[in-house]
Image: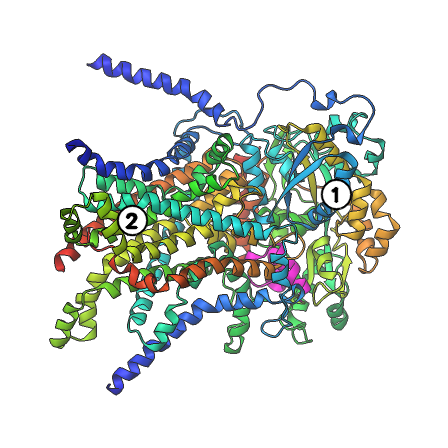
């Protein structure tokens, strides 16, 4: 009796084990990562002279996020199909759910989409498992890439931002090129010129000034005819997106780091004495001059408050203010000006950025056609048209940002171009690349919320650092 | 023919089970994945057996989430039950006002919860929201609805109540309308007061009807995601991170898939147990009500 | 009518009105939102220049969102899911109500338990499975997965309806020579028609409003209205007016359904849930 039971159990265990691996594989677990390191890239298969029509008749599937860049792309797709004979099928998803969709798709190992939009931080998440195609070989293959694509035309820090060696803590700009920059945003200050004029204010040059001005506006603007206006709109929701724009920019300008790298290991640095002081000051600024209900503030709330004349300043993406500033967009249209924002104590204008990029699925079966699409979408022709006639800004190419028509269009926004040119060279990804980026920054945002809610900054940030030390590094 | 007759009920139920049994496979697979340590940084996972569960149960974050989830579910279900039954009682009087309003009772239920939450968020935004605007004459124009842990939780419950109270009210009203009239007539003849009638007659006879609604609402509230996420994203701090939000963040946002799904398995177990208890209670009450009749 | 009774009556009506103010105000406000131009969304409350542009944009399939197609998809998928659940669920409900057979309670609870699993548990394996089976982004796929939402609801509520029917009527039919099947269709079913109408409406609403499954398991062929409505909140300005308009348009089918079966709706649920 005993042996029967024992044998049966062993048999079941064996079969379960044996069934497991094919089961897992059959269901796409191992989830899309390729065990075999493919020797060489599919780019090597492309030879001969460059030809736009090489992949005539193919169809490329694109996953896109609802965005003005997408609108501009869709409006111009016909010319791509005319040029290459390639058809593009696209799905547009709402921004808040877009990355969920992309994550599920990539992690399941199915190549439902050949190309998709992503940000630089997503490269840190999708790159290590091998879901992103390394575009470097494609770029360097002159049979696959036409001369007009002109790699040198991109702002160098943008191309570098999407380039990573996939090692935690390793600086960007080395390793594989996992996405191409498509459109980007610098994080600067935009302010309501009317209110500034009325209250006799000038844009802040130091962080202390910024906090003071925010408080002044909140105290005095309502009486000056701006009902319910507060000083500065900054994001505050429990998300990575709260740390990334204004906060990280000012943080970096103060010479602070999220992590420090010691021999390949990362150590959290949000709880150094200087970082604690800065975080306290930032939370204080929000309390004295920031939005009510700040802990639920996202891009939408911040930018619409600036447009609705509820916020005197916005410290966030320049495009966020741009869309409120163009004629007819909001009550504050025409009264919004741009400024690089306060400098750091040593004059630093280090700025964080967000780059909407285009990437290719490593499992795509139509890589050559996808590469032609990527080339065209990031090419001079489409991007120039998109920047001038649609709203595809900021341009990732130097030639377009210097283009006369573009400059003409943007000169109606006081300070936009000057601000852009002032910060562009110091703008890079200020975070330390590592795969737990989203966890780290979400916890950081939660910590910031707790400090705003009155908890002791030192203990909260020490707790954060302790928590992250075990997860990262 | 004998065996065919005995098997007949099974035949009738089999299609329903077949249709839904399909989910067992993905569910089993999901459960199976929690035995590994699959994540974006470990795409070739190792089997770690119950390591994930051990981590879950020893994490402060889990107990915090569990507590908030239970608070939310109990709070939302309780308010919806009381309010729903109250509305049903008021509508049952069949006054003119009631008959008119009854027709639009179901409207809030028709707005998808995720959209309702987004609209409520906009309404409750102090700077441009309409609620604060309307409260200004009363001096309440500066209330920040979601900035404190308590406020965030209560606001989320309020949105849940707004969407789902009609569900309870409709089922309760139907129950009221189907109660036999004779016990009430007898009580009226005996000169019983309203409260006495309500406590001794209405409530016990109505309760089985309402309990079905409560079960569905409680189960669904334990699994809440859309409403809270759209309103607060789990903030401020960690105060509204319910289990399903924690699971979503871990599995999809931070790409620690196996770990995140372990959270959902624990949640499933909680819902299962709670349902078992409630359904057993329902059975008891149904038998009691049948006897009372 | 004593003064006290009349006063209480008014108070009761007042309480009712207060509740409905709470319930309907957001919807009225959504109507206002949907009629506002995009640049007045955050700067005006009740005085604004109304425009139908929001509805024109939503229904005109502009902004890259084929909303009308999503609407049709939602209709097909929701109606299909409810019909399938009725076809499959009514016999199951009848069987478990009429006959005490071994394991009936367990089977019924198992059916309910499929609704307990958080969608997150199954969504990725389901995603992969659907792609392998070719069910991804299809009506069939969506109708099948929505059974998890509609079938337990229909079975559990209809079960009480059938249980509440006095067996005498069916016995009489059987004595008259009807087969059990005929008794079911000709006697039992018509008597619970109210219940069917009511529970179908609730199931339809839940299927119609479902968000997670359409989000992940469809792309552009079978996408539904809820995701579509959110798609208008994009990367430049949040166009809440479009989302509100889309949401209100989406309310129309469930509302029409509710109004059509209005007379059954409340009286209909009257037999539910009492007999075990």
Distance between mark 2 and mark 1 Cα atoms? 53 Å
Q: Does the magenta portion include A283?
A: yes
Q: Is residue B159 visible?
A: no
Q: Which residue is mark 1?
A: A78
Q: Quadrant of the C terminus of chain A?
A: top right
In which chain is the residue bearing label 1? A
Q: Camera-side residue: C126 or B262?
A: C126
Kind of element beneath mark 2: helix
Check disc 1 and report its element: helix, strand or loop. Answer: helix
Q: Position of residue A346 (x, y in %)?
A: 76, 49
Identify the residue shown where x is 24% and y is 47%.
Answer: C184
Residue at 53 percent across and 59 percent down: it is C249
Q: Give above or below for A444 relative to B79.
A: above
Report which residue position mark 2 lands on: C156
The image quadrant where one finds the N terminus of chain A is: top left
Q: In the orientation shown, which residue stands out farthest toward the left?
A: B190
Pointer 2 and pointer 1 on the same chain:
no
Disc 2 crowd, CA 10 A, few/some/many (<14, 14-19, 20+): many
- Residue B234 lies, with reference to residue B265, above or below; the image says below
In the drawing, does residue A389 fall left or right of residue B158? Answer: right
Q: Of residues B133 and C215, which is closer to you in this image?
A: C215
> What range of the chain is rendered magenta?
A282-308
Would you identify the image quadrant in which residue A114 lies? top right
Q: Residues within 10 Å of mark 1 (few under 14, many from 20)?
A: some
The residue lying at 31 percent from left, 60 percent from top is B171
């Amino acid at each position: 009796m005993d042996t029967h039971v024992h044998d049966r159990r062993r048999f079941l265990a064996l079969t379960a084990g044996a069934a497991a691996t094919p089961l897992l594989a059959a269901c796409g677990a191992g989830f899309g990562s390729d065990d075999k390191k493919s020797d060489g890239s599919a780019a090597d298969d492309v030879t001969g002279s460059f030809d736009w029509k090489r992949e005539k008749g193919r169809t490329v599937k694109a996953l896109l996020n609802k965005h003005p860049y997408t609108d501009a792309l869709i409006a111009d797709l016909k010319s791509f199909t005319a040029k290459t004979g390639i058809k593009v099928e696209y799905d547009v998803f709402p921004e808040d759910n877009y990355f969920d969709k992309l994550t599920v798709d990539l992690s399941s190992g199915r190549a439902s989409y050949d190309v998709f939009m992503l940000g630089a931080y997503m490269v840190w998440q999708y790159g290590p498992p091998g879901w992103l195609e390394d575009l470097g070989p494609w770029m360097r293959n002159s049979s696959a890439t036409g001369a007009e694509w002109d790699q040198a035309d991109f702002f160098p820090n943008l191309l570098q931002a999407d380039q990573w060696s996939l090692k935690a803590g390793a600086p960007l700009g080395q390793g594989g090129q996992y996405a191409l920059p498509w459109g980007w945003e610098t994080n600067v200050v935009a302010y309501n010129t009317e209110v500034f004029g009325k209250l006799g204010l000038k844009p802040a040059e130091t962080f202390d000034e910024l906090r003071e001005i925010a408080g002044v506006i909140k105290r005095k603007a309502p009486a000056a005819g701006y009902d319910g206006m507060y000083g500065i709109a900054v994001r505050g929701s429990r998300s990575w997106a709260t740390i990334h724009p204004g906060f990280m920019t000012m943080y970096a300008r103060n010479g602070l780091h999220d992590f420090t790298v010691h021999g390949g290991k990362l150590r959290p640095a949000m709880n150094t004495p200087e970082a604690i002081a800065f975080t306290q000051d930032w939370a204080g600024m929000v309390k004295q001059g920031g939005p009510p209900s700040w802990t639920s503030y996202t891009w939408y709330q911040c930018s619409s408050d600036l447009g609705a004349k509820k916020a005197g300043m916005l410290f966030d993406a320049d495009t966020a203010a741009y869309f409120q500033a163009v004629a007819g967009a909001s009550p504050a249209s025409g009264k919004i000006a741009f400024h690089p924002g306060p400098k750091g104590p040593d004059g630093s204008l280090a700025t964080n950025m967000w780059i909407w990029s285009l990437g290719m699925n490593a499992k795509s079966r139509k890589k050559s056609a996808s590469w032609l699409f990527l080339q065209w979408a990031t090419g001079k022709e489409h991007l120039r048209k998109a920047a001038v006639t649609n709203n595809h800004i900021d341009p990732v190419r130097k030639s377009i940002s210097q283009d006369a028509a573009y400059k003409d269009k943007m000169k109606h926004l006081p300070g936009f171009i000057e601000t852009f040119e002032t910060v562009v060279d110091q703008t890079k990804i200020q975070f330390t690349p590592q795969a737990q980026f989203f966890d780290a920054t979400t916890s950081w945002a939660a910590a910031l919320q707790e400090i705003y809610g009155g908890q002791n900054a030192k203990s909260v940030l020490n707790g954060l650092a302790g928590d992250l030390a075990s997860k990262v590094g | 023919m004998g065996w065919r007759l005995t098997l007949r009920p099974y035949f009738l139920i089999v299609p329903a089970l077949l249709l839904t049994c399909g989910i067992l496979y993905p569910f089993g697979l999901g459960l199976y994945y929690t035995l590994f340590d699959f994540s974006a940084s470990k795409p070739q996972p190792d089997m770690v057996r119950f390591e994930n569960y051990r981590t879950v149960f020893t994490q402060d974050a889990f107990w915090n989430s569990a507590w908030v989830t239970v608070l939310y579910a109990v709070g939302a279900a309780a308010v919806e039950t009381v309010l729903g039954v109250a509305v049903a009682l008021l509508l049952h009087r069949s006054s003119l006002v009631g008959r008119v309003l009854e027709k639009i009772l179901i409207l809030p239920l028709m707005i998808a919860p995720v959209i309702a939450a987004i609209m409520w968020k906009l309404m409750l935004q102090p700077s441009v929201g309409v609620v604060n605007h309307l409260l200004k004459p009363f001096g309440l124009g500066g209330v920040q609805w979601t900035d404190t842990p308590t406020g965030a939780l209560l606001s989320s419950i309020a949105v849940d109540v707004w969407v789902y109270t009609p569900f309870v009210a409709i089922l309760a009203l139907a129950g009221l309308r189907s109660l036999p009239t004779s016990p009430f007539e007898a009580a009226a003849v005996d000169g019983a007061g309203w409260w006495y009638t309500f406590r001794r007659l209405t409530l016990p006879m109505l309760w089985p009807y309402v309990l079905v609604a409560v079960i569905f609402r409680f189960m669904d509230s334990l699994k809440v995601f859309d409403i809270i996420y759209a309103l607060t994203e789990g903030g401020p701090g960690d105060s509204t991170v319910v289990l399903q939000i924690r699971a979503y963040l871990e599995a999809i946002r931070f790409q620690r898939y196996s770990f995140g799904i372990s959270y959902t398995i624990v949640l499933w177990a909680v819902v299962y147990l709670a349902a078992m208890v409630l359904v057993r209670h329902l059975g008891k009450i149904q038998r009691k009500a049948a006897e009372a009749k | 009518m004593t003064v006290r009774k009349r006063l209480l009556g008014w108070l009761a009506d007042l309480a009712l009105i207060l509740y409905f103010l709470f319930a309907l105000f957001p919807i009225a406000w959504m109507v206002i939102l949907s009629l506002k131009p995009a640049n007045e969304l955050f700067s005006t409350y009740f005085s604004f220049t109304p425009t139908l542009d929001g509805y024109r944009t939503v229904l005109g399939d502009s902004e890259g969102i084929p909303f009308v197609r999503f609407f049709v998809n939602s209709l097909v998928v929701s109606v299909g899911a409810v019909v399938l659940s009725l076809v499959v669920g009514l016999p199951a409900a009848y069987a478990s109500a009429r006959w005490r057979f071994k394991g009936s309670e367990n089977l019924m609870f198992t059916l309910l338990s499929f609704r307990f699993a958080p969608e997150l548990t199954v969504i990725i394996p389901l995603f992969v499975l659907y792609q392998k089976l070719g069910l991804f982004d299809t009506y069939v796929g969506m109708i099948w997965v929505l059974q998890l939402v509609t079938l337990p609801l229909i079975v559990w509520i209809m079960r009480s309806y059938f249980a509440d029917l006095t067996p005498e009527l069916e016995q009489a039919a059987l004595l008259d020579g009807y087969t059990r099947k005929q008794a079911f269709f000709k006697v039992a079913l018509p008597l619970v028609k109210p219940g069917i109408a009511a529970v179908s409406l609730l199931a339809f609403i839940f299927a119609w409003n479902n968000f997670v499954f359409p989000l992940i398991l469809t792309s552009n062929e079978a996408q539904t209205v809820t995701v579509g409505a959110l798609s208008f909140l994009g990367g430049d300005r949040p166009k809440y007016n479009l989302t509100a308009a889309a949401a209100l348009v989406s309310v129309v089918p469930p509302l029409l359904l509710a109004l059509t079966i209005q007379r059954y709706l409340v009286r209909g649920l009257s037999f539910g849930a009492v007999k075990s």
